[in-house]
Image (spheres, grey):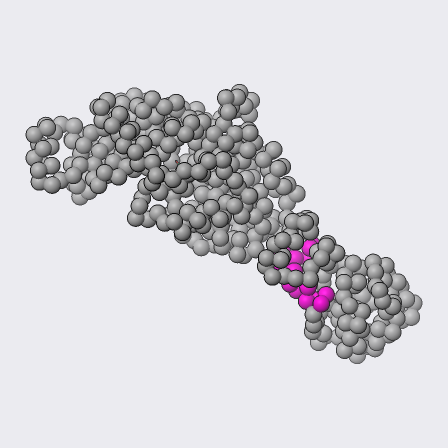
Amino acid sequence: MMTPKGIKAMLDGGVKVRFAPSPTGRLHVGNLRTALMNWLFARHHGGQFLLRMDDTDTERSKMEYERGIVEDLKWLGVDWDDFARQSARNDRYDRATEILRNSGRLYPCYETPEELELKRKIQLGQGKPPVYDRAALDMTPEEQAALAQQGRKPHWRFKLLEEAVEWDDLGRGPVRFEAGHLSDPVLIREDGRPLYTLTSVVDDGEMFITHVMRGEDHVVNTAVQVQLFRALDFPVPSFAHMPLMVGADGKGLSKRVGSLGIGDLREAGIEGLALVAYLAHLGTPIAPDGSSDMADLIRHFDLSSFGRASPRYDTAELEALSTKVIHRLPFSQVQQRLQSSGIEDVDQTLWLAVRENIETLDDIRNWVKIANGDVERPVDLVDDDLAYLKTAADLLPEAPLDDTSWKTWTTALKEETGRKGKQLFMPLRLSLTGLSHGPDMGPLLPLIDRDRIVERLVG
Ligand code: GLU
């Protein structure tokens, strides 16, 4: 594992990273974590962040997904310095294909998927690794021409050099692959469309990407891509492969689980800042406490603090963090959001009085109702309490009520009735808010109209 010092020394030339989602679905916590690692790394080092749509899969890529990804990133405050779409760069991939063909590193193959599957099964049956046998390399030009005549279209494979590929992974430490154990990857499909293995290298190379940070499910791709970078004469970027998250039960996270979608979390009222802080710390020894803002997260981001074990993503932990974040939010940061959610009548005083009693922003509706609407009197007030509440109505200070009114009021009530503690306070809280728990009554009292208070007390 590289030390922070080592990473810093390496970065002096300027950092450029990318997040390259395939717009075949919305963002989920798994790929958002990759996005955040790259973004925080770039911002921490004063580098650049590229958002690239890996949309070469024309059947599955959709504009609505691209828009969704952009919307989710914007919601979280993740911005980019550069934007690219692979579908607009086919000429670049054609050029790279030409270079590889000319240097003898790209060769046509005519096997059908069924033939390949059969070979694979035979190899596995013989206890051998299912590595492509390069039979296509033994075909004569005549045999190829004959197949082409029959209308068979080739797919194209990249010829790996029989040498070990090694790199010092910023997530995993030193990695070594024997290229002889890998299949020559298909770069071009039968219909001529280039595949991810090629397009990603061409883009990373031409766009001067210095660091590729992604999930460890890409380690084998990297082994192949390192050779491809070299074959195309690009500098090889540094790589960091991060362990994939697992669920709270220790099992793999599936992106099909609806509740892991960023849009769903947002709908459920999770704070964006909490989501960023949670994912940015998952896998490190630090547990976020809701006190960091985005600038803090950027400042403290440290790739070397991530461990090698699969971190556990736990929705309950995220929700708890989100609540902590809400409890600290200044009014300036929620004013606009309240307005756009159609929640009116919340001013700074109300916000500060109740923010620590809500779990999601939407919960504030209850407190707006308590301040300005109707409250149902709880049924469990006994006769004795009803008489007490009448006395309370008589002793309520005159308008305007202020921060000191609650104290004045309850002191007078204590003297008059001899009640104290819970007996003194609970009937007041219950009749004024309809709830047995909630914020300090001191700041809350002046937020309720005096006539309303009297009505609730004697109602
Ligand atoms: N589009 C690829 C994916 O979403 C990108 C992988 C990479 O970072 O190279 O898996």
Find residue 190 and report its horizontal and vertical position in percent: 20, 39
Q: Would residue 121 be seen by someone viewing this image from the given angle?
A: no
Give residue 131's quadrant in the image.
Answer: top left
* Image height of 230 relative to 417, above or below: above
Query: Is residue 183 part of the magenta span, yes or no?
Result: no
Is most of the magenta stretch helix, strand or loop?
A: helix
Going by the image, does 353 lie left or right of 65?
Answer: right
Find residue 148 and report its horizontal and vertical position in percent: 11, 36
Q: Would residue 402 be seen by someone viewing this image from the given angle?
A: yes
For the record, the magenta segment spans 354-372
Query: Is residue 361 part of the magenta span, yes or no?
Result: yes
Q: Nearer the viewer, residue 357 or 385?
A: 357
Give me the residue at 55% from left, 33% from top.
43
Find residue 426 and report its horizontal and vertical position in percent: 78, 67
Find residue 359 and report its horizontal and vertical position in percent: 63, 56
Give residue 221's quadrant in the image.
Answer: top left
Give me the residue at 39% from left, 24% from top.
236
* Image height of 201 relative to 379, above or below: above
